[in-house]
Image (spheres, rainbow, N blue to C red):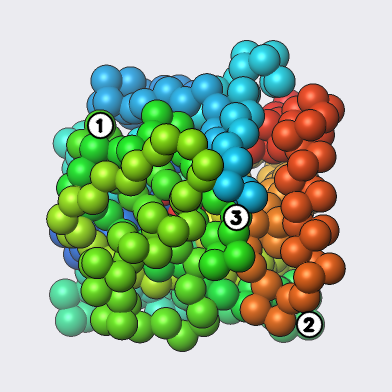
Amino acid sequence: MRTTVGIIGGGPAGLLLARLLHRAGVDCVVLESRSREYVEQRQRAGMLEQGTVHALREAVAANRLDAEGMVHRGIELRYARESHRIDFPSLTGGRTVTIYPQTKIVQDLIALQVADGPPLLFEAEALAVENADSERPVVRFRHGGREETLTCAWVAGCDGFHGVSRAAIPADLSREYAHDHPYAWLGILAEVPPSCEELIYARGERGFALHSMRSPTMSRLYLQVPVGTDPADWPDDRVWDELDARFAIDADWALKRGPVVEKSVTPMRSYVHEPMRHGRLLLAGDAAHIVPPTGAKGLNLAVSDVRLLSRALVRWHSTGETQLIDRYSDVCLARVWQATRFSYDMTKMLHAQPDGDAFDERMQLARLRRITASRHAAAELAANYTGLPLPE
Ligand code: FAD
Ligand code: DHB
């Protein structure tokens, strides 16, 4: 097989890239190792920055998002049994965020691509990217029990953290920066209307908790748990009791309980690979970087990488110029490091440190008090949370 852009991975990054390229008349092929059912059900992120919503609209992939997405104008911070609201529009010149599940973004993009888009091969596992620094890189992949090759002008590595693309960059040209956070998140999806109108980030001595949502009838909640936690040790009642304790404030508030339909544990890691390009291989999304989920940057970063990447590839396709491709890695990484810093700071500020002492706890409270007392400090949080601007 031959194509102009070979895209490895059919997650949000790969699917959106394919959509943007297809609309600009650049042909591509997407290889996805899992089945359609699997990728359409995988529970992940839910909070979209304004720029992410804009990108999906630009790709004409936002019909359901515009009908069902829930626009949020702020978040609530809870600590010391108090509740404080951060109002985004007044702090950012009008910016908001939208709650819309990653699973639905993936379903929407797959439906469009299957209907009239470029080829999307499920259960097609990329095995290796070869000759990345030549004019004709090749992706070797397995599909339907046979080994095949995809010869491309460019390869987009959108295959997530555990993919194969990153490994095609020679070790002596790669720099890796990583930090493992000493806790994990237990996430549940529950069939119960959210107990709040906006997301609640709660810090307490028992650990962090987050109340998010997927729709007016589905709640998504997270608890800080120790690394290595087995979800089987957390029967539903234990999860709800712990959430109740962590969200408690000195005011009237009650957490609604309902049937838990999904439960899983997510590790928390900060990781950045530099550079994001090697020859004709370009990495995007989790293939190049991951952040701990506090602050909800993972999906949004994947989308902003792809916006920059599609612009660069479309420019090359229409003019033969590679200037934008040459700048792709540096421009992305500047943004990636800002999101990495923000996610790291939010994580450290809100989680109980397993080896922390009373001093650490006072530092966390001082940070939170500064954010809720100073318009300046709140505006800094709001600017990062709603998304830093994409470079021109
Ligand atoms: P992915 O979504 O990982 O997509 C990569 C795709 O490539 C996958 O479909 C995979 O099957 C495929 N693939 C892998 N290897 C190969 C191969 N060899 N050949 C072909 N295909 C391959 N972010 C948030 O902002 N908030 C959250 O609450 C949140 N929760 C998360 C929970 C979990 C369990 C995980 C893993 C991530 C979570 N994230 C969250 C992060 C967010 O979901 C990711 O940042 C986002 O999915 C990145 O999109 P992506 O397309 O780059 O990678
Ligand atoms: C969600 C996850 C996050 O990590 C976050 O900060 C906000 C929302 C979510 O899954 O809805």
Residue located at (65% from left, 79% from top): 354
Name the residue type under label 1: Pro
The kind of residue on which mark 2 rests is Asp
The alpha-carbon separation of the residues under discs 1 and 2 comes to: 50 Å
Left or right of 62? Residue 250 is: right
Give the mark, 1 or 2, whose residue is nearer the N terminus: 2
**Circles 1 and 2 in contact, beta carbons < 8 Å:** no
The quarter of the rendered structure image containing the N terminus is bottom left
Residue 217, position in %: x, y? Answer: 20, 37
**Circle nearer the viewer, 1 or 2:** 1
Residue that label 3 marks: 203
Which residue lies under the disc numbered 1? 216
**Disc 2 marks which residue?**
172
**Can you tell me which quadrant of the image ligand 1 is in?**
bottom left
Up/down of 245 relative to 358, above or below: above
Location of the C terminus by quadrant is top right
Image vertical order of residue 312 relative to residue 232, above or below: above
The answer to which image quadrant residue 278 occupies is bottom right
